[in-house]
Image: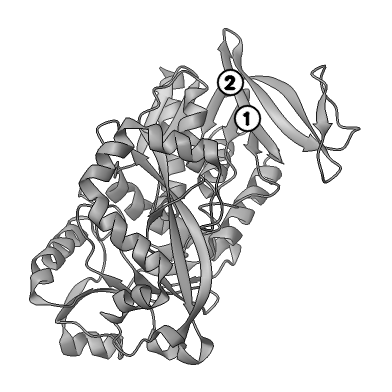
Amino acid sequence: MTGRVAVVGGGILGLAVARRIGLVRPGTTVTVFEKESDIAQHQTGRNSGVVHAGLYYKPGSLKATLTRRGVGLLREYTAERGIRYEECGKVVVAVDDGELEPLAEIERRARANGVPGVRMLDADGLRAIEPHARGVAALHSPTTAIVDYPAAARALRGDILDAGGAVRTGAEVVGIDERPDGVHLLVRVRGTAAAPTNGHGPAPAQDDGQIEVTEPIGPFDLLVACAGLQSDLVAELTGEDPSPRIVPFRGDYWLLRPERRELVRGLIYPVPDPRYPFLGIHLTKRIDGEILVGPNAVLATAREGYGPAVLRTAELRQTLSWPGFHKMARQHWRTGAKEVLRSASRRAFVAEARRYVPELTAADVVRGPAGVRAQAVARDGSLVDDFVLAVRGRVVHVRNAPSPAATASLAIAEHIVAQIVTESAA
């Protein structure tokens, strides 16, 4: 940790790790490699902007401990940098008596995780906080917040640069080779014909007039891979087991029309199905004032497939050939069919949200953005729920870091770097 460190991935987690290394080991040269033309282009820039308080997570899990730590760190960081952060609050709504027991379990977990201010509401208490919401009971989390995650990512990049590090965009790591002198990378970059090729020579020119070149870079003393939707593929470059495999799930959102935004004050969530890491269709105030309705969760036909028309055959074939996918599909096909129906029908989509806000109609929404969740699926078909980190020699892999990873990003970075420092000291 006194020489050179590479970080793969320019989302909020990779940037947080790079910043943390610079703070803990001043003088270390840190380089972030991001394959897109800018940072925060995928999960960081395409989520709802919620800062999760830690209601749902199993007490003692990495998700629980790092989310609670991450909330405090993120709140402090955004205040220091002047980034918008609003504790708008959240209600988790039980629409009938059958949901009261699982709602009570969420309250138990929230209290065990140290979430401040949570309290159970009756129907009248729910209406006092969200006048247009309906349910037999609700759990209120007043400190659940919303934030501008892309702005936070940009601030982290600024910190890295100020500390003497580098953030290379348009630089995709396609090869990783650990040798006695350190970790060597093969990086595919896009540039003009004048770009240096380091002897590998340019690929044919692209339609936009640029060319692709491959560039060997290294050695690095350490590599930390925070590759999100590509995390399993990057892990395989170092010989790691393909399990868990990333199976991409697209989440579609609708937006409330401006004249109907009064239907939602903060965040209105359902009682989630405990079988799934997804939280179900909900209504979410965003930091820019928009109100999101969604997301659903349907199998994406590309790892970065943000629309139903985006199809990358090789990536879809890779998903469908994964043994864990078949086991997962056999077990959950009915739920999957319902999600596909909601994706295809605005009325069916809105009908789910109308369980919590009965005044909502299909005419109140317009098509909104979409995101893709990097869901890790094990070989046995189980949906991996907790954060998963793996170490192979001089390489640290973040194998699973879905929501609430943005909330927990500064704490995950703290956790990873603490492990690195401890091991290097030993």
Q: Nearer the viewer, residue 45 or 163?
A: 45
**Which residue lies under the disc numbered 2?**
176
What is the distance, in whole Å, between disc 2 and disc 1 at their CAs? 8 Å
Badge 2 element: strand
Q: Which residue is mark 1?
A: 173
The residue nearer to you, when weighing 142 against 366, is 366
Q: Nearer the viewer, residue 299 or 254?
A: 299
Asked if 239 appears above or below 81 in the picture, the reply is: above
- In-image side of 208 versus 316 (left or right): right
Q: Quadrant of the N terminus?
A: top right
Q: Are marks 2 and 1 in contact (CB under 8 Å)?
A: yes
Q: Secondary structure at mark 1?
A: strand
Residue 348 spot, x, y in % from top left: 34, 74
Q: Where on the picture, by quarter, is residue 267?
A: bottom left
Q: Nearer the viewer, residue 224 or 72?
A: 224
User: Is the residue 258 above or below the residue 85 in the image?
Assistant: below
> For this view, does 280 lie left or right of residue 107?
right
Q: Residue at x 18, y 90 (%)?
A: 124
Mark 2 residue type: Ile
* Location of residue 407 in the rendering, given as x and y in whole percent from the top left corner: 42, 56
Q: Callout 1, which amino acid?
A: Val
